[in-house]
Image (cartoon, rainbow, N blue to C red):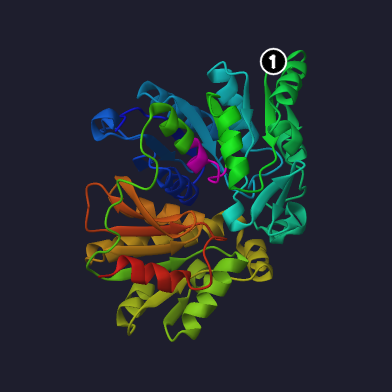
Amino acid sequence: MSNKLFLGIVGDDFTGSSDAASFAVKSGLKTMLFDGIPSDIDLEKEGIQAAVIALKSRMAPVAEAKEQSLAAAKWLVEHGAQHIYSKYCSTFDSTPKGNIGPILDNFLEGFEAKASIICPALPVNGRIVKDGILYINGVPLAESPMKNHPLTPMWDSSLKNLMEAQSSYKCFNVPHDVLYDEEKLKALIKNIEKDNEHYYLIPDYENDTDASQIAKVFGDMFIQSGGSGVLTALGEYYLKKEGATLGVSHIPNSKTDGKALLLAGSCSVATQKQIKTFKESGNQVIKIDAHKLMSGELTAKDLWRDYKSAKGYCLIYSTAPAEEVAALQKQYGTEKLAHKIELTMNELTKLAFADGFTRFIVAGGETSGAVIKGLPQDGYVIGESVAPGVPVMVPSKHPNVRLVLKSGNFGDEYFFEKAIKMTGE
């Protein structure tokens, strides 16, 4: 096995980073995920071939997101990373001002790199790029449910328009006929480089064949970016160059003893359906009353008492339809409401861990970040996936614990039931 660190991945939230890690490990790369920059790990000694650093930079102030991301990328390079990959959501979650563009601009400038790819597609979850347009389950991004996202509503479906609104550099589409024609691609890049010090390329990406072609023609770029979809192809490309074995390896056992804490904070349509299915299957659910929570009438200890008294599996959730969320944000303020809910999820995690719970199954990026902060800080070995982009994770220093943390839109309607079954003895 090669001990080279082929990929250093910087993610903009924890669930997106675990998503990236799951696709990297699928190629055969030994992969570890870290919550922030680690302090006491020898990646070469551990044989790590893909290292993922999860930040909370998606909605952070631009200057802070740039600084944190560049520091993480530099740490990865100092520890041997041959390529840096900026991981963001397959729905290009961002505001018109960032933070995807500013982070990538900073990477190009900080590492004196000429260009990067913009590659958010994840075909297995219905996200594809065709003629530079990002589609979600066949619907242009700005016409999909993402147009109603409470934090990052999407206002355009063109990746060029979305990226150039927040970047200092121009973007250029790479349609299929150019992607698969070496001479056309060379001519395009030569023409671009006449007038552009830095630039971005947006390749069409509709299926796994496209992913392999993207890895073949852009895999040697030092700075790359996108969703998780292309990471398996990139891993396979690097392993093939080394003459190494492809395929899943280094996979820990998904199962463990112990009780499970189930939490949901995502307000996505997918998560709403998963909660409904979980409840209709005969399981107990506890909805967080936002008004009582904000007034102090309801606390994490109250929720924990109710959770402990439940029979069988139980789920605590703050998930609500978009119109209900909008009304709550208007009444209490978006940041104050989000902070209070995250703090509650964090406290619930601490209570469960102290009580010996070993399984943590969570829906929602912000909620997952709160859960991670409630556990002892650690690196995570990546295991098999409950759903595409949703791996079982094992803390390296707490091998009896299992975490399943998903982005809101991921997984089918039986996600919670599958995660319980996969992680339980």
Can residue 175 be seen from the camera position used here? no
Can residue 268 be seen from the camera position used here? yes
Q: Please state the total of marks drawn on the protein image.
A: 1
SS category of the residue bearing label 1: loop
Q: Residues within 10 Å of mark 1 (few under 14, many from 20)?
A: few
The residue to which callout 1 is attached is 197
The C terminus lies in quadrant:
bottom left
The N terminus lies in quadrant:
top left
Q: Nearer the viewer, residue 332 or 106?
A: 106
Residue 25 is situated, as x and y percent measured from the top left of the image, at 40, 45
Residue 131 is situated, as x and y percent measured from the top left of the image, at 77, 42
Q: Residue at x 31, y 47 (%)?
A: 381
Left or right: residue 421 compared with residue 97:
left
Q: Is residue 268 magenta?
A: no
Q: Nearer the viewer, residue 382 or 294?
A: 382
Amino acid type, residue under disc 1 in the picture: Glu
Left or right: residue 172 compared with residue 94:
right
Q: Nearer the viewer, residue 45 or 101?
A: 45
Question: Quadrant of residue 315 in the image?
Answer: bottom left
Left or right: residue 157 compared with residue 228:
right
Q: Residue at x 31, y 64 (%)?
A: 359
Residue 43 is situated, as x and y percent measured from the top left of the image, at 29, 31
Q: Does residue 377 lie above or below 220 as drawn? A: below
Residue 171 is situated, as x and y percent measured from the top left of the image, at 73, 30
Residue furthest to the top: 194
Q: Residue at x 25, y 35 (%)?
A: 46
Q: Residue at x 59, y 41 (%)?
A: 211
Left or right: residue 108 compared with residue 255:
right
Residue range highlighted in magenta: 227-234
